[in-house]
Image (cartoon, rainbow, N blue to C red):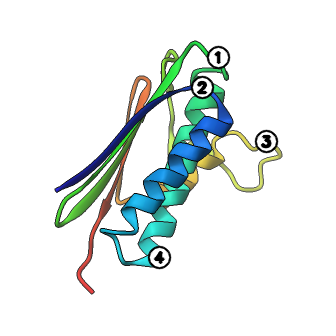
Amino acid sequence: MYMFKRQFVSDRTIATKNIHTMLRLLRKVVPDEELLYDIRLITNELIFNGLEHGNQFDINKKITFKIKLNDDSIRICVQDEGTGIDYCSNSYFNNDIYVRGRGLFIVSKLADELKIKENCVEAKLLVRPN
């Protein structure tokens, strides 16, 4: 099992640096570039949703994120210090003029499982043998 965990203040630059660090370390244990792309996209969406919608870019609030790799799955968990969300994947329509909800919709399509509980979002990807 491999685990990466970070906590940082609600700052875009700091968030981006943490994502880059995570990807650099994951490249050593995840050789599949397509899987790394999905991990990066999911992580970006969840962290930046937490920064904007959860913490409202309040520098006094933190984002906690962790990635756990097992033989058969990868779990990406992001928690902010906001009030939580009430999300339904059926509420996003791609022809809607509003862009709200698109990030979680994308994550729900990339992940094999998406759990949202208050201010914590967890995406699970199943690792398929080559």
Where residue 23 appears, as percent x and y from the top left, is 46, 59
Residue 89 left/right relative to 72: right
Image quadrant in which you'd find residue 95: bottom right
Tag on residue 58?
A: 1
Contact check, label 1 and label 2, Cβ < 8 Å: yes
Q: Which residue is mark 4?
A: 34
Q: Tell me which residue sits at (46%, 77%) in the image.
A: 33
Residue type pointed to by label 3: Tyr
Neighbor class of circle 1 (other Cα within 10 Å; few <14, some 14-19, many 20+) is: some
Q: CA distance from mark 4 to mark 3?
A: 29 Å
Kind of residue indicated by mark 4: Glu
Label 2 or label 4, whichever lies nearer to me, is: 2
The image quadrant where one finds the N terminus is bottom left
Q: Residue at point 48% right, 64% down? A: 38
Q: Which residue is mark 2?
A: 10
Q: On the image, numbered disc 3 is attached to which residue?
A: 98
For label 4, the crowd category at 10 Å Cα-Cα, with few meaning under 14, some 14 to 19 and many 20 or more, is: few
Residue found 38% across the figure and 62% down from its top = 26
